[in-house]
Image (spheres, rainbow, N blue to C red):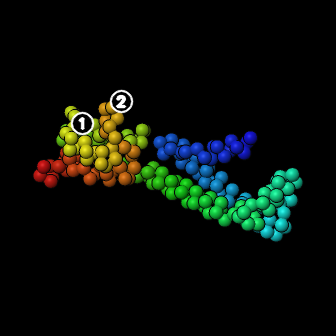
């Protein structure tokens, strides 16, 4: 039962909005790395002894079941086939990349936003959202531009928003009419 609970915990999605996301991702990476080492040790042990009996913390009953499973399996003569090790490696790379992304986000400041002619841009770090507030309903052209850049209308709070990340900031910068008011004046608009 404990093993199933651990699997369930490790399979849960860790949202970037979660204040403990970095800590949870580091724990997940540590678990994945430990499992990778365990699988390698099990494969090495089986290759040397041709049985799982005597393998670390494995009862003779469990070892017998594992031996039967290995012999009946189509993937070869080892407890953990290559594809399982490769999938686990891919998961470790993915988690490492998420950790780097969140660390980078923590180090770089997106600023607090700006005002533009007709509204305000807010970098809402608490909600992990870029939010665009208009003084009045924007015209169809700007709404299409917002949608095509990944922004969604949130009627409950009356803002256009998307996730706060580098891609979101770049998308916002592509929309000329939402640039800071002082930048618009410099460009002669």
Q: How many marks?
A: 2
Quarter where residue 37 is shown: bottom right
x then y, percent, for residue 38 = 73, 59
The residue closer to the viewer here, 149 or 159, is: 149
x then y, percent, for residue 63 = 84, 56
How many C-alpha atoms fall within 10 Å of the one at disc 2: few (<14), some, or many (≥20)? few
Q: Say if 5 sits above or below 47 in the image.
A: above
Q: Say if 143 sits above or below 155 in the image.
A: below
Left or right: residue 182 versus residue 104 is: left
Residue 156, labelled with which disc? 2
How many C-alpha atoms fall within 10 Å of the one at disc 1: few (<14), some, or many (≥20)? some
Residue 189 in view (yes/no): yes
Q: Secondary structure at mark 1?
A: strand
Which residue is found at the position 21% from the left and 50% from the top?
Answer: 176
Q: Say if 15 sits above or below 41 in the image.
A: above
Q: Earlier in the sequence, mark 2 or mark 1?
A: 1
The residue closer to the viewer here, 51 or 106, is: 51
**Residue sitting at the far top:** 156
Left or right: residue 156 versus residue 38 is: left
Q: Which residue corresponds to mark 1?
A: 134
Q: Secondary structure at mark 2?
A: loop
Image quarter (top left, top right, bottom left or bottom right) of the N terminus: top right
Quarter where residue 117 is shown: top left
Q: CA distance from mark 2 to mark 1?
A: 15 Å
Which residue is found at the position 32% from the left and 37% from the top?
Answer: 153
């Amino acid at each position: 039962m404990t093993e199933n609970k651990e699997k369930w915990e490790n399979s849960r999605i860790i949202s970037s909005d979660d204040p403990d996301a970095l800590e949870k991702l580091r724990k997940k990476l540590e678990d994945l790395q430990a499992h990778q080492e365990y699988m390698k040790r099990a494969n090495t042990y089986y290759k040397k002894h041709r049985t799982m009996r005597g393998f670390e913390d494995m009862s003779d009953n469990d070892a017998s079941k594992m031996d039967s499973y290995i012999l009946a399996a189509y993937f070869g003569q080892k407890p953990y086939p290559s594809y399982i090790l490769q999938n686990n490696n891919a998961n470790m790379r993915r988690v490492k990349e998420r950790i780097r992304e969140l660390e980078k986000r923590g180090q770089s400041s997106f600023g607090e936003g700006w005002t533009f002619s007709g509204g305000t841009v807010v970098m809402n770090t608490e909600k992990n959202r870029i939010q665009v507030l208009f003084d009045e309903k924007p015209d169809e052209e700007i709404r299409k531009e917002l949608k095509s850049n990944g922004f969604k209308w949130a009627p409950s709070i009356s803002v256009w928003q998307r996730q706060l990340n580098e891609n979101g900031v770049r998308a916002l910068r592509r929309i000329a009419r939402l640039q800071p008011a002082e930048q618009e004046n410099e460009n002669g608009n």
